[in-house]
Amino acid sequence: MVKNSLQGKNALVTGGTRGIGAGIVAELLAAGATVATTSRTPVDNLPAGVHYIQADLGTPEGAAHLGAETLKHFDGKLDILVNNVAASQAYPGGIATIPDEEWLTALNASYLSTVWVTQRLLAGLIEAKGAIVNISSTVTLDAVPPLAHYAAAKAALERYSLTLAAELAPKGVRLNVVIPGNVTTPGGNKVRQEMADGFGVPVEAFTDGTPLGRVGIPVDIAAAVAFLVSDQAEWITGSKLLIDGGASVGLAA
């Protein structure tokens, strides 16, 4: 990312304490933004200068708390919102084995959290003519029964995002979706191990064969997010950017 390309910008990254979210926080900081982030459980290892707000975004109350604290910290000015928070657990036995409560958890954490947070920050983003990036997943592109609940939530997120992008464009706010593939993160590694254990195969079965020859790392996603929220992408909105090393070629048409 170009140094200082986000100088003077205030940014909130949800779920920014580990994995892809932490990568995004680091990338926005490197580009000069002032960054706040959140997670459900407290952390003490954030980069210097990052403002931390504890909140459970799987509830409307948690999202309301985050919205209020974010606007208070930034004196009402928010230029960038990255909705990254999500939750997933694999059920190798298939769709019939996914408990009712897991469908609700996936819906709340991986879709409605974005709706609730965005709703509470939208007025400030409109005033700033800001930019939003929502993080989805390649599970929306193919049938993966053990993750059907997570895929359904992320599919809803994508449709919501594109509809909101159309509504916000005349108001000067850009909204894009980033779709990561297999990325090495604590959450992603956990899900892949659950799948491998359930099917009795090596975990490498879920990462081998990527056309570009390797599994993704958080900066692969973070660099794209930093570009999309910068002025370099001022004519890009309503897009879905697939970043998966070519693994989904032919599925994303």
Image: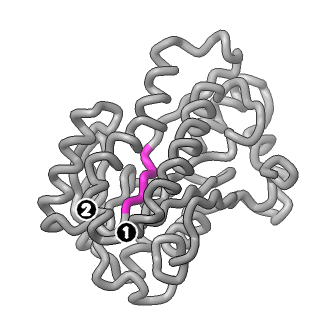
Colour mode of the rendering: one colour
Residue at image point 27% right, 67% down: 127
User: Does 139 sit left or right of 2 as displayed?
Assistant: right
Residue 234 lies, in percent from the top left, at 51, 78
Mark 1, residue position:
130
* CA neighbours of label 1 inside 10 A, class few (<14), some (14 to 19), many (20+): many
Residue 130 lies, in percent from the top left, at 37, 69
| Circle 1: residue type | Gly
Q: Secondary structure at mark 2?
A: helix
Q: Name the quadrant containing residue 45.
A: bottom left
Q: CA distance from mark 1 to mark 2?
A: 8 Å
Residue 163 lies, in percent from the top left, at 53, 48
Residue at image point 33% right, 40% down: 116
- Of all residues shown, which one is farthest toward the bottom? 3
Q: Any mark on residue 200, and which?
A: none
Q: Would residue 128 be seen by someone viewing this image from the given angle?
A: yes
| Circle 2: residue type | Gly
Q: Secondary structure at mark 1?
A: loop
Magenta stretch, main secondary structure, is strand
Q: Would residue 25 be seen by someone viewing this image from the given angle?
A: no
* Circles 1 and 2: CB atoms closer than 8 Å: yes
* CA neighbours of label 2 inside 10 A, class few (<14), some (14 to 19), many (20+): some
Residue at image point 43% right, 46% down: 85
Residue 232 lies, in percent from the top left, at 53, 83
All told, the count of numbered labels is 2
Q: Any mark on residue 124, and which?
A: 2
The span shown in magenta is 81-85
Judge by depth and name the residue closer to the eye, 136 or 132: 132
The reply to whether the magenta stretch includes residue 126 is: no
In this rendering, the answer to whether 158 lies above or below 35 is above
- Of all residues shown, which one is farthest toward the front? 170
